[in-house]
Amino acid sequence: MSEDCGISLEELQLAARNHGMPLEALREAITPIGLHYLLIHYDIPQVDVQTWRLEVDGRVRTELSLDLDAIRALPSHEVIATMECAGNGRARLAPRPVSQPWLLEAVGTGRWRGARLRDLLDQAGVDPETAEVLFTGLDRGIENDEEQFFQRSLTLADAALPEVLLAYELNGVPLPPQHGFPLRLLVPGWYGMTNVKWLTRITLLAEPFTGYQQARGYRLRQNEEDDGEPLSRIYPRALMVPPGIPDFMTRERTVPAGKVTIEGRAWSGHAPVAAVEVSTDDGATWQTAELEPPELGPWAWRSWSYDWNATEPGPHVLACRARDEAGNAQSSEQQWNVGGYANNEVQRVVVTVA
Amino acid sequence: MSEDCGISLEELQLAARNHGMPLEALREAITPIGLHYLLIHYDIPQVDVQTWRLEVDGRVRTELSLDLDAIRALPSHEVIATMECAGNGRARLAPRPVSQPWLLEAVGTGRWRGARLRDLLDQAGVDPETAEVLFTGLDRGIENDEEQFFQRSLTLADAALPEVLLAYELNGVPLPPQHGFPLRLLVPGWYGMTNVKWLTRITLLAEPFTGYQQARGYRLRQNEEDDGEPLSRIYPRALMVPPGIPDFMTRERTVPAGKVTIEGRAWSGHAPVAAVEVSTDDGATWQTAELEPPELGPWAWRSWSYDWNATEPGPHVLACRARDEAGNAQSSEQQWNVGGYANNEVQRVVVTVA
C-alpha cells in the first residue's frame, strides 16, 4: 500500500473537489448529507430559484416552462436509492485510466423526494415517434475539447418507469447545491451519470442522442477505436466497514483478538442481491454472510454481517463479494476498460489482530 | 499542471476520505453542509446520544458528567467562523510532506451554535493552579505508532475567551456526524486541529499537555530534530472563485473577452483583513481589490472583488493575496516545513481569454 502510484496533479485536483463516502459511513442506512459521494464534471452552478425554470420541449404536444412550485404541485413520491459513480474502483486498475481517481468510496444512499417524470411527460403530451428523452443540466464546461452543458438521455421506456423522479429533496431537506439544487433527475439502480443535476431542460427526441457523455464517455470500451457498450445499471458490489481502528497515514487496521463482527452493505441495480460472501484468508475460502431483508426498498443497499473468530495474531486479508439474482457477480480480478468504469473487483481490507 | 507529482496510494486514500471545498463555493457566505472541508484523523465514531456524556475532570472543584440537554440548557451563542486546515496548501510544497495532500480547498465557513466553554468551566470551578485545558475526542486510531484518542489542549486564558464554544449546531441543524456529533469544540480564528470533534472529556491540567498532537504534530519544524513552534491562529489567505468555465480534466479555465469580475473571500485568525490585492499578470503588478465590510462578524471571511478588463486573448495567470492588520501577509513563495503546515503561498489561476 505504500508504493508510489504516480497520481498526477490533475487527478489530485479532481480528488480534492469530488469526494467519496468514508467507509465507516456504511453503518448508516441513509447516508448523511456531506458523506454521500459527489462527482461534479464542471462547476457547481449558482441557481436563483426565483428565475429558474424547467423547460420541456421537442416532440411534445405542449411545451412547458415550469417553476419549482409547479413541480412540487405534482403528486410527490419518495424513493430510497443507492447511487454509485460508474468510475468507482478506477484508481485500482492497472494501467490506471486518468480521470477522477476513485478507490472504493464513490457511493451513498439518499432518501429522495420528487415528482414522477412520467407525470410531467403526460402533462406535456409525448409524440408517439419519440425515441429518447434528453436531460440538460446547468453545469457547463469543456470536455473532449467541446464546450458543453452536461447532458444525458434515456429511452422513453426507461424514462417512464415509475421509480424515475424529478427530485427536489434529499433526506427531508431541499437539494443541497452540490446535489443539483433546485431539481435533479433520479434514476434508481443506474450509475450516477444518469442522474442529471441542476436540471434545466427536458427534450423529447425522435433519434437517439449522440452527445459526448452518451456516445463517447460512459461506455465500456476495450481500446480507443472500440465504440463500446453504454453503461446503464449498477453492477453488484459489497463493501464492509473496515473493522477496528486505523493508522492515520496508512489506514491499516488493528483489532483486538476475539469475535469481530464484520458488517457492511451490498447492492445491485440489475436485480435483488442474492448473497454476500466473506473471506478472512484473502479469498482462499468464502463463507456466506447473513443478509438482512431489503428494509429500505428495492433500490437501496442491504445490510449484511459475518462473525469472524479472530484468534490468530498478525495480519489477515478480509474480503467480501456480492452477487445478484440476475447472475451478475464480483470478481477477484479487475474489470479493465479505457474509461475505468464498472470495476467491481472485490474489496480487500488488511487487518492486524493484536 | 500535467506533470506526474507522484502522489502515493496512501495520500490518495486520505484524499478520498477527507474533502475540500470546491472553490466555486466561495460564492456562498456560509458554506453549505457537505461543502465545508473535512479532515478526520481516524474514523468518524458512531455516537449514541442517549448514552453520550461530556465528562469534566482534573483540577476542578466539582467533576461534571453532562448529557446534551444539560449543555443545551446553558446560555446559547452563535458564531460565524471560517475554519481552515493547518495543512491547507501542503500538496503545493516541494519536496511535498507526505500526509493529507491538500491543494487550496481545506476551508469553510460555518454558522455554529453552542454554549460558551467558560460558562461550563465556571460551573465546574477551576483550580487557580490550572495551566491548560485538555480536550479529548472519541475518534481513536494509531499515529506515530501510538494508539490514541485525538487530543489537543489550550491555555486556560485561550479557553476562557468569549468566542470559544461547545458547539452542537452547524448552520441551524444538529452537528452532522462528520463535524463532531453531538458536540465539538469551536475556537474561532484557530486552525482546524484545535476544534476537537466528538468531544467526550475536558480535563483541567496543572502542567502543559505533551501528547502527540501537541508536542510533535501541528508544529512548524524546519527539520526532524527541531522542536518547532506550535501552530495556533490562522495566517491570512485570499482565494478567488476560479472565473469562467473549467475543462473537466485539467480544471483550466476559459472566459470570454470583456469585463470579468474576479471575486473571492479573505480571512486571517490573527487580526482583521487589511487589504486584498489582485494580479492579472502572474504577480508582476498588483491592484487593490474592493474589500466588503466584515458582515459576518470578526471570525469569518470577508468578500472582495476586482473588475478585470480582459481584452487580450490567450492565457493569463491571475493571483490574489491578503494581509492583515497585525502585519501578516501572503508570499509568492512556499512556506516549507516538515509537516507542511501554514503554507499560505498565493493562489494562481490560469485563465484563457477566448
Image (tube, coloured by chain):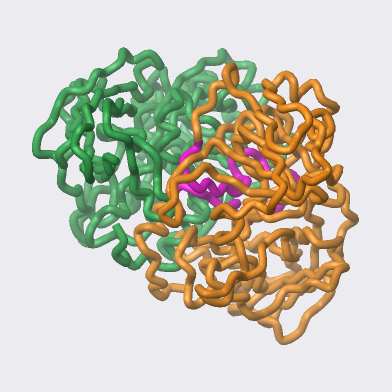
Chain colours: A orange, B green
Position of B164 with respect to B259 (left or right) is right
Name the image quarter holding residue B54.
top right
* Residue drawn 30% across the image and 15% down it: B292
In front here: A173 or B244?
B244
Position of B287 with respect to B320 (left or right) is left
* Residue drawn 59% across the image and 23% down it: A52
In front here: A154 or A127?
A127
> What count of labels does the image hold?
0
In the image as oriented, which residue stretches furthest toward the left? B284
Return the x and y of residue B43 as percentages of the image width and height.
Answer: 57, 53
Q: Is residue A343 magenta?
A: no
Position of B15 with respect to A80 (left or right) is left
Return the x and y of residue A30 as percentages of the image width and height.
Answer: 73, 44
Q: Which residues are magenta?
A: A15-44
Return the x and y of residue A171 as percentages of the image width and height.
Answer: 72, 35
Q: Quadrant of the C terminus of chain B?
A: top left
Mainly helix, strand or loop, the magenta region? loop
* Residue drawn 27% across the image and 33% down it: B257
